[in-house]
Structure formats: C-alpha cells, structure tokens
Image (cartoon, grey):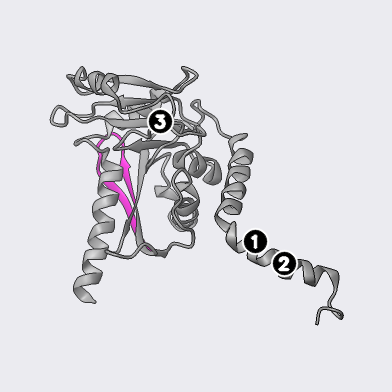
Amino acid sequence: MLDNWEGWQILVIFLLPLIFLFRRSIKILYFDTYQLILKQRVEFKDRYDGDIKYVGGIDISFIKNDNINACISLAVLDLDTLETVFSRNEMIKMTCDYIPGYLAFRETPHIAQILKTVKTQFPGFYPDVLIVDGNGRLHKKEFGLACQTGVTCDIPCIGVAKNLYQMEGCLRDDDHKSSIDKLNSPGERFEIRNVKNVVIGCAVRTTAGSTKPVYVSQGHRVSLETACHVVMKCSRYRVPEPVRLADIMSRDVLRQLQVNG
C-alpha cells in the first residue's frame, strides 16, 4: 500500500500520532523558546518619555462556564486626579489554552490588539504606563504577563497580582505571613526575593482598609520603585483603580449580554 508513497509522506504518517500525543510538551517547548528570545529585550529600569500622565489598566473576564468567550476592558486614568479619561471594551475569543506559568500566551495577543486600536484611533489617550492583572518579574522565569506584554507592545508595564506567585525560594509560608502582618500602614512593603536572593517584586499594602497586600513587579521599562509609586498613587482600594475599573467594566459587559441574551 505504501509502495507509491514518497518518503516524507510516510514520515508524516508516523509522526502525526507522536505530535498529537506530545502536543502539550511541544507547545511548552515553543513557549519557552519564544519567551527566551523576548526576555533578551526586557528592561527592568525606568525608560519612558516625559512624565507619567495616563495610566492604563487591563482586565479580562469570562462568560460563566465558558473559557473561550471573554471581554477585555481597558481603563485609562489620569494619574493625578484618578479620573477616567478613556475606556474601551471588546469581546474576544481565546485561541490558546491556559497553561500555568504561560498566561501571557493566552492574554497578550488580545492586550496587544486593544492597545493597537487605541494607538491608531485614539492616540491622545494612549497610556504612558500599563498595569496588568498578573505578574511581571515575579515569575519562575522572571518573565510573566507584564513582561511579555511590555516587550511585545513596547510599553512601560507593571504587574499587579492579588496572590503570591509561589515558586522555589518564594513561598506563602509562616515567614511570609509574618511579614504581611507587619505591614501596618498604606505604602509599607517588603521585598520578594527568588532563590538566588534577587529582588523580583514587592508585597505592598495599598490602603488602610485592606490588610492583604498586592504583589507588584516590573514588567518592562519601569523600575520596581516607580512601579510601587504608581500603584500607590492610583489605589483607592486594595487593587489599583485602572485594573479595578477595567474588571468592573468587563463584568458589566458580560452581565448585560446575559440579560439581553
């Protein structure tokens, strides 16, 4: 039966089942390689034009019991007044499965698209700095969502997470909980270090009303000091306003869809 087949055709026939069987491992290998390339371009120091006037926040919310259809929202606020100067919502479809440690491959393409739309159609409201709901340098490869978004979109970016990204040398243990208990006032923080004792983020208490910190880390073209300063300056509640409002907006859009649907 195979006598008239070319060698490459036979090879494909035998390789296809293996590719299917190991598709997750192949995908992770591709992700690792791609991240390694992008990581060469990341900058963990301040490099932005002029003063920071507009701060953007991104959040993605999913339709209930649906991990494909979602709404991505961008809220752009004036850093001094915390007034919303621009907002945008878009319905999106996820094309990449969620794999722990590789959230950026699921979300960054959609973040890049909404930023491109704003830059093209509403350039006056393009954010000077972007905050994402996720980690930056506080990541097992020191290259989380905020880093990949920052490098891909060439925008100063900050990662803010509500929970500690646990990894070797960075655990939510008794010492960590004890450090949290010592954060008594807004603005107080402690450094998060990796197994090599390198500072990769900070736990920051943002308000008097919230005893739980947020975890701030550099994404791209922003120092850790600037990242913490921006987060504190735009925090009325535990989560900084740009991200908090983006979350509210995206959930409202989905709620309206369910009501009208």
Residue 207 spot, x, y in % from top left:
18, 29
Residue in the foreground of this view, choosing between 210 and 158: 210
Quarter holding the C terminus is: bottom left
Element type at mark 2: helix
Circles 2 and 1: CB distance less than 8 Å?
Answer: yes
For the point 48% across and 50% down, the residue is 108
Q: Which residue is mark 1?
A: 18
Question: Can you tell which of label 2 and label 3 is closer to the viewer?
Answer: 2
Task: Name the residue that disc number 2 marks.
Answer: 14
Residue 119 shows up from this direction: no
Place residue 174 in its image quadrant. top left
The three-letter code of the residue at mark 3 reads Ser
Q: Which amino acid is tagged 1?
A: Leu
Q: Secondary structure at mark 3?
A: strand
| Residue sitting at the far front | 1
Q: Which residue is mark 3?
A: 217
Query: Magenta stretch containing residue 83, yes or no?
Result: yes
Earlier in the chain: of badge 3 and badge 1, it is 1
The magenta stretch spans which residues? 74-91
Disc 2 packing (10 Å; few <14; some 14–19; many ≥20): few
Q: Residues within 10 Å of mark 3 (few under 14, many from 20)?
A: many
